[in-house]
Amino acid sequence: MTTVSDLIAYVERLTGHALGREEWLLNGDRDRRINGVTVCWMASPDAIREAGEAGHELLIGHESLFFPYNAPKAPNLPQGWEMWRTNRQRRELLEAFDTTFLRLHSSVDEICIFDDFADLLELGEPVMAEGFVKVFEILPTPLADLVAHVKTCLAMPAVRVSTTEGMDQIVHRVGLPWGGLGLFVNVGYQQSLIQQGCDVFIAGETDNYGFRFSQEVGIPMIETSHELSENPGLRRFTEMLQTTFPEISFSFYENPCVWRSE
C-alpha cells in the first residue's frame, strides 16, 4: 500500500533535495496509507470538502493552510490566531473528513510551476536562466499588445497594469514574478530580474509597493492572479503523480481567481 512517505520521496527525487522548511504535514503522518489524493493551489473550504467527499485521505496544497502566512511556523504569531474563523473552519473540516494535509510549495515551484506559467504565456525557452531567475525574449511589441496576449492566454477579461511610458511603450525582455513574487515582500526577486535587463514583468500577484518598485525605474508590470499563474503547473503535477502512482486516484481542484473586476 502506498503511503504519504512514498509521495514525499518521489517529490524529493525530482528536486534532488529534502522538502523545504515551509513544507509540512497536518492531521496525519508519513506512514498513512492512501488510496486517493486531491491536489489544489490552496486548501480553501471548498477544496477540503471536495477531497473529503471523494474519500481522499490526502489533500496536497501549494499555499499556506493557515493565516497569517506560514502559520504555525511563522514567527511572532498574534495571540489566538488558531481560533480565527478562517483557520478554525479549515482545521475543523480536515478533522471532520479525517483528511491529512501536506503542503508542497517550493518543491513544486521547482518541479513545474514556473515553467508551466511560461508555457501558458507562449514565451518559449528562456534566453537566460539561473535557478528561478529566468528571462524571456519576445519580438519588440507595444505594452498594449502584450497585455492583450496575456489576457487571451489566461482567459481573463481584465488585468492590472502599471505603466511608465503609457500603453505604447515597446517591450521585449520579459521577467516572470510568478505566484506571489510580485508582492512588496519579494521585491528582491524583481531586482534580480532588473539586473538581467528585463523591461517588462508579467506577474502572478502584486500590490501597491510591488508595482511601484519596478514602475519607478521604468519597468511596467502586468498582474494576472496568484492562483491563475500557478494552477497550470499544479494540474501538471497532479498528472505526474497519477502516472507515477497509478494505483491511487488523483484529482485536481482548481481554485478560481478570488476577485473580479466590475
Image (cartoon, rainbow, N blue to C red):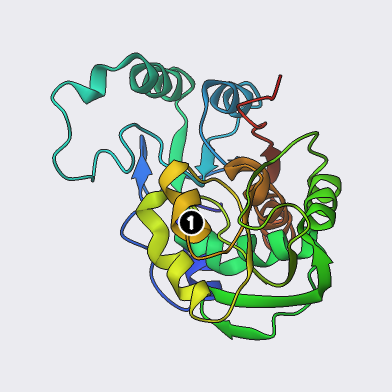
| Residue 23 visible to the viewer | no
53, above or below 172, in the image: above
How far from the left and from the top, in percent, is residue 224?
66, 45
The residue nearer to you, when weighing 88 against 11, is 88
169 on left or right of 221: right
The residue nearer to you, when weighing 68 against 224, is 224
Residue drawn at the location 13% of the way across and 24% of the way down: 79
75 on left or right of 153: left
214, above or below 173, in the image: above
Query: Label 1 sits on what residue type?
Result: Leu
183, above or below 173, in the image: above
The residue nearer to you, when weighing 114 against 15, is 114
Image quadrant where residue 122 sits: bottom right
Residue drawn at the location 61% of the way across and 56% of the way down: 164
How far from the left and from the top, in percent, is residue 260?
68, 24
Q: Count every numbered label the image shows and give the total.
A: 1
24 on left or right of 156: left
**Residue at the extreme front:** 165
Find disc 1 in the rendering and name its residue.
181
How far from the left and from the top, in percent, is residue 209?
41, 47
| Residue 109 visible to the viewer | yes
How far from the left and from the top, in percent, is residue 51?
60, 29
Q: Quadrant of the C terminus?
A: top right
120, above or below 189, in the image: above
Residue drawn at the location 38% of the way across and 66% of the way down: 188
Image quadrant where residue 228 sits: top right
Image quadrant where residue 66 sits: top left
